[in-house]
Amino acid sequence: MAVKVEQTRGKVMVSRDIIVVGASAGGVEALQRLAHDLPADFPGTIFVTVHFPEHGTSVLPQILNRAGPLRASHAVDGDPIEPGRIYIAPPDYHLLLSRGGVRTVRGPRENGHRPAIDPMFRSAAVAFDRRVIGVVLTGNLDDGTSGIAAVRRAGGVGVAQDPEEALFRSMPDSAIAHAGVDCVSPIGELAALLTKLMHEPHLRVAEANVADDVRETELSALNLEAIADTGNHPGHSSVYGCPDCGGVLWQLEEGELTRFRCRVGHAWTADALLVEQTVQFDEALWVALRALEESAGLAAQLAKKQRDRGHQTLSERFERQAKDLNQRAEIVRTALVQGPIAQPTRDIEPVVDAAHARTGTR
């Protein structure tokens, strides 16, 4: 891929030409507007990750192709990086960037998602440092915040959609609060902003410390050597278990943002981990209710059988057991009726935009 390079007083000037965009709930509408506003001669390359379910049929490339002049397609592993194109993460695959081209990897989920936004941002920062512009659009929770932080650590630019106009403001709010974005833009002005940023060459400075970003990118790519190298794992061991695999989570601190990653690479922000724990707690209560109801029913059946046989003592023992189990089941039933302590906030992009972009395989 051709990169504009200039010499200024012996220093190298490099244009920004790699744009990574992350979106979730409400993202299809925002991406349609961005694609519509981009000029046909846009010189950069755009990479998009939207949180979609893992199975189905995705028509997001067709939607963006109809919306604007740039060619949009699902990324295919090994694709070269070409200017003036939009590469979209295929469902069930992370979209990662490297100097040699595009990678699609069925790596560990981040915040329960695959594809996930942060691995794409992180890999772009590692591969292209100051050439990268990271953009966080509408969505729930705090996906994209860690990725924007990685982009800015490597010298790139962080951009967030104006939360006041975002359909779901949590993601841009989090990026602004915790990653310190460089620009906040309404979606209707984003294409012009990207064009402006691309045409502002900047000095390449000494690289920031991105060792942990390199390491995490290797984990997202399912690098077996990185997984086995537990002595070099980012962060420190926590007391929490991974909801995906049950392994120990390492805790990482990025300013005020707390994140976790397990040995095999599953990653969670603190907010996303709490949501997943709430969901799993609710599921555990249903399992407990089923077990208590079944045990109570079995104890009542045994009580009747013993009573019919004239074994009063055994019958009374099973009746007490059934009563105790029913009381416990009632406690669990009440907890389920009341709902979780804190209602989890899940992205609903697949439901909201199902008519526009049902997602699925490559």
Image: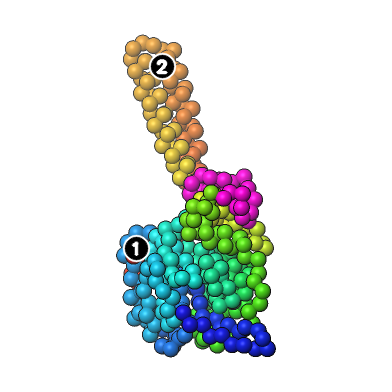
Q: Identify the residue shown where x is 61% and y is 55%.
A: 234
Check residue 74 for magenta coloring. Answer: no
Residue on which the image places disc 1? 360
Q: Quadrant of residue 252?
A: bottom right
Residue 269 point in image, percent of width and height: 57, 57
Indicate which disc, 2 or 1, sits on the residue closer to the N terminus. 2
Q: Amino acid at mark 2?
A: Ser
Residue linked to disc 2: 315
Q: Secondary structure at mark 1?
A: loop
Q: Nearer the viewer, residue 162 or 362?
A: 362
- Relative vertical location of residue 287 with respect to residue 71 in this rendering, above or below: above
Nearer the camera: disc 2 or disc 1: 1
9, 105: nearer the viewer: 9
Residue 23 visible (yes or no): no
User: Is residue 122 at least partly visible in the picture?
Assistant: yes
Which secondary structure, mark 2?
A: helix
| Residue at (49% x, 56% y) in the render | 223
Q: Which residues are magenta?
A: 229-252
Position above or below: 356 against 38: above
Residue name at image x 36 percent, y 10 percent: 310
Q: Position of residue 314 (x, y in %)?
A: 42, 14
Residue under the point 63% across and 70% down? 153
